[in-house]
Image (cartoon, rainbow, N blue to C red):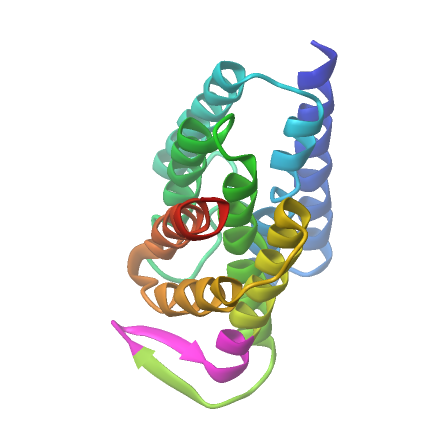
Amino acid sequence: MIKFTVILLYLLAIFLISIVFKKYNEDSKEIVRKIIHIGIGPLLPIAQFLKINQNSALIFTGIVSLIVFINYKYKLFPTIEDVERKSYGTLFYCLSLFILIYLFWDKDPYALITGFFIMTFGDGLAGLIGKGLNSKSWIFFKQKKSLFGTMTMFSTSLIVVCSIGYAQQNSLNLNYLTLAFFATLLEQFSVLGIDNFIVPISSALFFNFFISS
């Protein structure tokens, strides 16, 4: 019970921060959403540290996913879905987390955290930097992408992979660079928010197959 209390308190803190930020920055809807997107990232290592078992993690994630789906339909918590485009990104976010926990919670927690961190920190920071700084941009599948955003995605992904890979193997190898490039390439496919699904799942599978193995 104490373990889940810690998790719930952490989630509550993230949502409170986003609500306060939105109150004083009403024109920054995307930034508010990214605060939640990035802030949830540390939940996985926290849950692993607390030794929460896989079934409990799946049930908890399933409940959260159901709440997110209901919110998508009825906008009970508009902070989560405040974007100016049609997107299923939040739903894909929860679905990818559920699948990652199912596949790697006990089998390969390093791959699990790598995939999730690349999505939360890499994709999240790429969105913030890409929108916040002017740089060369292009349209891919009707989605605007920027040079600075893409560079942020690559560099953040590389930092994540190198850090976690080194923690696991105490060494560096070329596959870290390959995975960062692969994740950055997949992030370009962001139509309807599908990148929140394909980036973490593919990155975790790549890490498990080419690095852990």
Vertical comparison of 188 with 51: above or below? below
Vertical comparison of 22 with 143: above or below? above
Q: Position of residue 46 (x, y in %)?
A: 69, 32
User: On the picture, is 196 further left or further right than 114?
Assistant: left
Which residue appears farthest toward the top when viewing the image?
A: 1
Quarter containing the C terminus: top left
Examine the rendering and report whether any part of residue 87 can be seen. no
Q: Position of residue 1 (x, y in %)?
A: 69, 9
Residue 64 within the magenta-colored segment of the rendering = no
Examine the rendering and report whether any part of residue 93 can be seen. yes
Which residue appears farthest toward the bottom when viewing the image?
A: 136
Question: Total of numbered circles in the picture?
Answer: 0
The quadrant in which residue 26 appears is bottom right
The quadrant in which residue 71 appears is top left
Q: Residue at x 38, y 36 (%)?
A: 95
Q: Residue at x 29, y 62 (%)?
A: 191
Nearer to the camera, 170 or 50: 170
Residue 146 within the magenta-colored segment of the rendering = yes
Q: Which residues are magenta?
A: 140-151
Nearer to the camera, 83 or 89: 89
User: On the picture, is 54 further left or further right than 166?
Assistant: left
Vertical comparison of 141 with 171: above or below? below
Q: Position of residue 124 (x, y in %)?
A: 55, 59
The quadrant in which residue 12 appears is top right
Vertical comparison of 107 with 122: above or below? above
User: On the picture, is 12 further left or further right than 156?
Assistant: right
Q: Position of residue 17 (x, y in %)?
A: 73, 45
Q: Residue at x 60, y 76 (%)?
A: 132
Which residue appears farthest toward the left when viewing the image?
A: 141
Q: Residue at x 48, y 15 (%)?
A: 55
